[in-house]
Image: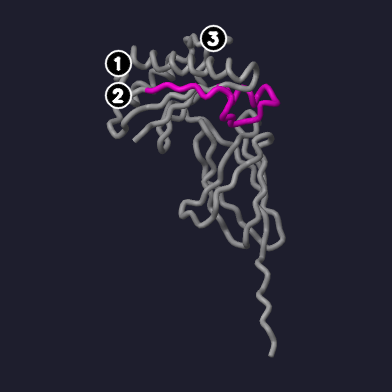
Amino acid sequence: SFALVPEAPKIGHCLGSVKNADGTGLTAVFTIEDGSRQPFGTDPLTGEFKQSLQAGNYEFKVQAENYLPQNIICEIAPNEDFTINVVLEKPATAVVIEDKIVLPEAIFFNFDSAVIQPRSFEVLTQIAEILKEATNYESLQIEGHTDSSGSESYNQSLSKRRARSVEQYLIDKGLDANRLKSVGLGESDPIATNVTPEGRTENRRVEFNLIR
């Protein structure tokens, strides 16, 4: 008798990069809605990715912090590479995406300070209006983040003070202080490389997470 040798799976690759409009590589995650494949991500230094997949067509949602998600299709043929370069965009105004408020631009502070720059008042006012109209959330967590310049302890303190300044601005706009919480995460959760100035700019940010 002859033993049947199972046919080797027909494998190809989906590869490319995820960047912003300025060309900075982003830390992004690829997911499939039905959960049929494990999520995978980009190289945080370059924004590049390469994933082995069995032959077929796959629709992935590409997500990066503070950017609008984007759906892509990878068409995989055996022993071939399918290349796609993704550019993620910012929204025109602040908008709720799942459990996050995604901003059109970063919240800006004076250098080495927790003083909010006036050019960020409009975006913060947009956030306040979203929260006044929303009823399906328990609280808002305001997270301050820094790049890796300076000591870890100082960055944690600076990020906390900046998050607290944003919290106070929203309270002054009439939001319930009991539904707001500010935390400082310092340099512990980068979304881009800290090697380049552009990456460090991405990492200096404030995030707004809705707790349902």
Q: Which residue is mark 2?
A: 132
Which corner quadrant holds the N terminus? Answer: bottom right
Q: Is residue 10 above or below residue 90?
A: below
Q: Quadrant of residue 182?
A: top left
Measured as percent of width and height from the top left, residue 174 is found at 30, 15
Decide which of 174, 187 is in the foreground and name it.
187
Regarding mark 1 in the picture, which secondary structure is present there? Answer: loop
The magenta region covers 181-204
Whether residue 78 is situated above or below residue 32 in the rendered picture: below
The residue pinned by badge 1 equals: 174
Three-letter amino acid code at the position of disc 3: Ser
Under mark 2, the amino acid is: Lys
In front of the other: label 2 or label 3? Answer: 3
Query: Can you give x and y, in whole percent of width and height, for residue 203 in the image?
Result: 58, 25
Dot placed on the residue nearer the N-terminal end, 2 or 3: 3
Instruction: Work out which quarter of the rendered image holds the C terminus and state it.
Output: top left
Residue that numbered label 3 is attached to = 113
Label 3 or label 1, whichever comes before in sequence order: 3
Q: Residues within 10 Å of mark 2 (few under 14, many from 20)?
A: few
Residue 20 figure quarter: top right
Q: Is residue 157 magenta?
A: no
For marks 1 and 2 on the same chain, the one whose residue lies earlier in the sequence: 2
Kind of element beneath mark 3? loop
Circles 1, 2 touching at the beta carbon (< 8 Å): yes
**Residue 176 x %, y %:** 29, 20
Which residue sits at x=47%, y=15%?
120
Q: Amino acid at mark 1?
A: Gly
What residue is drawn where x is 30% and y is 24%? 132
Residue at the far front: name it: 153
